[in-house]
Image: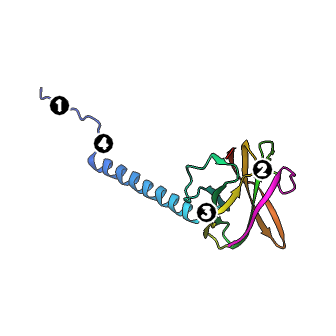
Amino acid sequence: MPSRKLKTPHISDLSLEKITRIVLIVGIISVSGAIVYTLTSPKEDDILFFLLNEEQMLKDYPTNVTQGNKVIIHIFIQNLMHETKNFQIHIYRGYSDTYIDPEVSIISNPNVTSVNVQNIVLANEEQWISDPIEVEFTEIGDNQLIICELWIKNGEQWEYLPGYVLTLRIDVIPS
């Protein structure tokens, strides 16, 4: 009796090629869709607001100062609000018992002294670094503060921006 060869089921090379093409097409469409979504989705409004040291860096902040000497800082702001905005920075000197609630401005707190107020107009994506801001500490004590608040102009009114508060604690030692 002649032997018969049994055919074993397998995917033909043609079918494997079709599956590969379909997977590649689906992948290309998915990646293209993700790119289009990323480029066309609305961007959230934001403001970058940082305290910089004397060298305009985000590090090595002073922690001690001798009584009567000054701490020098800079402020950085970048407007990502998608339109030109007017900003105001309030800078205060506070003491170890100064309570800060980032949801409420410290402007009327009797335990702070106003050091500086600056007005800045920034176009969208424009950034600004302040000139050196000097804060003098005349009283000896630990945990004294430099406090920076950000305000924005809406119409004719200046509005405090909750959460945009920067602080730096300084120990003031005798001279």
**Which numbered disc flags the more N-terminal residue, 1 or 2?**
1
Magenta span: predominant SS is strand
Position of residue 87 relative to residue 11, above or below, is below
Crowding at dot 2, Cα within 10 Å, few <14 / some 14-19 / many 20+, comes out as: many
Which mark identifies residue 41? 3
Q: Name the residue under label 4.
A: 11
Residue at x 50% of width, y 61% of height? 35
Crowding at dot 3, Cα within 10 Å, few <14 / some 14-19 / many 20+, comes out as: few
User: From the viewer's perspective, is 144 left or right of 157?
Assistant: left
Q: What type is the residue that disc 2 sits on? A: Gly
Q: Indicate yes or no whether the magenta region holds residue 119.
A: yes
Q: Which of marks 1 and 2 is in front?
A: 2
User: From the viewer's perspective, is 144 left or right of 54?
Assistant: right
| Callouts 4 and 3 close, C-beta under 8 Å | no
Q: What type is the residue that disc 4 sits on? A: Ile
Q: Which of marks 4 and 2 is in front?
A: 2
Q: Name the residue under label 2.
A: 94
Q: Indicate yes or no whether the magenta region holds residue 141.
A: no
**Which numbered disc flags the more N-terminal residue, 3 or 2?**
3
Position of residue 89 relative to residue 103, above or below, is below
Q: What type is the residue that disc 3 sits on? A: Ser
Magenta span: 106-121
Q: Mark 1 points at which residue?
A: 4
Residue at x 65% of width, y 73% of height? 123
Q: Nearer the viewer, mark 3 or mark 2?
A: 2
Distance between mark 4 and mark 3 Cα atoms: 43 Å
Dot 3: element:
loop
Out of 132 and 5, give the one closest to the viewer: 132
